[in-house]
Image (cartoon, rainbow, N blue to C red):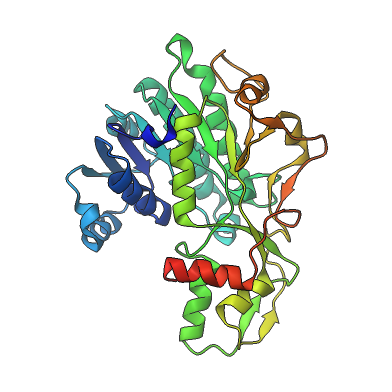
Amino acid sequence: MNTALSLQDKTILVTGGTGSFGKCFIRKALTEHNPAKVIVFSRDELKQWEMRQSDPIFDHGKIRYFLGDVRDKDRLYRAFKGVDLVVHAAALKQVPAAEYNPTEFIRTNINGAMNIVDAAVDCDVEKVIALSTDKAANPINLYGATKLCSDKLFVAGNAYVGAKGRPKLSVVRYGNVIGSRGSIIPRWRAMVQEGAKELLITDPRMTRFWITLDQAAEFVIDNFGRMLGGEIFVPKIPSMNLPDLAQAIAPDLPTRITGIRPGEKLHELMIGEDDARHSVEFPEYYAIVPEAIHHQAMATMDRLVALNGTPVPDGFYYSSDRNERWLDVEGLREVLKKLGI
């Protein structure tokens, strides 16, 4: 399928639509892809109101604001009527908060994922893409564990489509989003503006994957066009270490090492060695295919190789410290300048 036409004339629903990704995706969908309708599904009426007031594009005649929580299956069934495509971006995300409030993360990130799958199957949605995180690969914290479970639920959800062959359900997994709400760059910017004398760094050895909101949204749109069902799509994106990040943000400030917080890794992983047996490489992304194939239309190694993919070698893994692509200080400054951050 032509990925440029993947959203055209479609009714699209975005859970967590008032978040950083949701707003970027919706803006791009409306300005570049001519959908029939876009439904913003989220639980906070104030954020919906603020979003609508923030920019004329978010008061577009094709937008519908729908209050609801992914924990509420009945509300999802109501929202999914007549929907073609679903982007599942709603989640609880903060690692420390997850360690203190595990049941809340389970209810939203796991039970909510189950509800999305059930509603999509029963309401005859065409395609679903769920957003994941690098923390879902070999997780060491509760947030990552809930997202790994969510990933498994969406992949396994392809078993329930039956003879009609829909919905197709896939996952997009990527790293830290540059400048997203609550992330390290806005926090450091705020500290500098408030007159901080130093920046706090957990560990100078730490590396992270980085992607812009626009790149993340475009990657999701492209995958609506190419998905077969059951894939976990992983973009090839650059890594950066924390000292270089600090240097790009505040070159004149010293740094102080605070130590790794509970639940953090030195380096993030997006494809583990155990996934190499069923991972395929393309020029700008990887695709992890499901180990259990539930129907003939799902993604398999053979089908992706036939689409010019290349199986990754045994022992391969894709981690932020073993990346071939890197952002240096000047590279990040150029990105931030383009983004106006």
Q: Position of residue 110 (x, y in %)?
A: 52, 39
How many labels sit on residues? Answer: 0
**Left or right: where does residue 144 sit relative to residue 53?**
right
The residue sitting at 65% across, 21% down in the picture is 292
Q: Position of residue 228 (x, y in %)?
A: 52, 24
**Left or right: where does residue 337 sit relative to residue 151?**
left
Q: Residue furthest top?
A: 163
Quarter holding the C terminus is: bottom left
Q: Is residue 169 above or below residue 194?
A: above
Quarter where residue 221 is shown: top left
Q: Judge whether residue 1 can be spotted in this image.
A: yes
Q: Residue furthest left?
A: 61
Q: Judge whether residue 91 can be spotted in this image.
A: no
**Left or right: where does residue 227 sit relative to residue 273?**
left
Quarter where residue 272 is shown: top right
The residue sitting at 17% across, 45% down in the picture is 61
Out of 306 and 63, give the one closest to the viewer: 306
Q: Position of residue 222 (x, y in %)?
A: 46, 38
Out of 174 and 31, give the one closest to the viewer: 31
Q: Position of residue 327 (x, y in %)?
A: 63, 64
Q: Is residue 140 above or below residue 300?
A: below
Quarter holding the N terminus is: top left
Q: Is residue 116 above or below residue 138?
A: above
The residue sitting at 54% across, 54% down in the picture is 101
Q: Is residue 169 above or below residue 69?
A: above
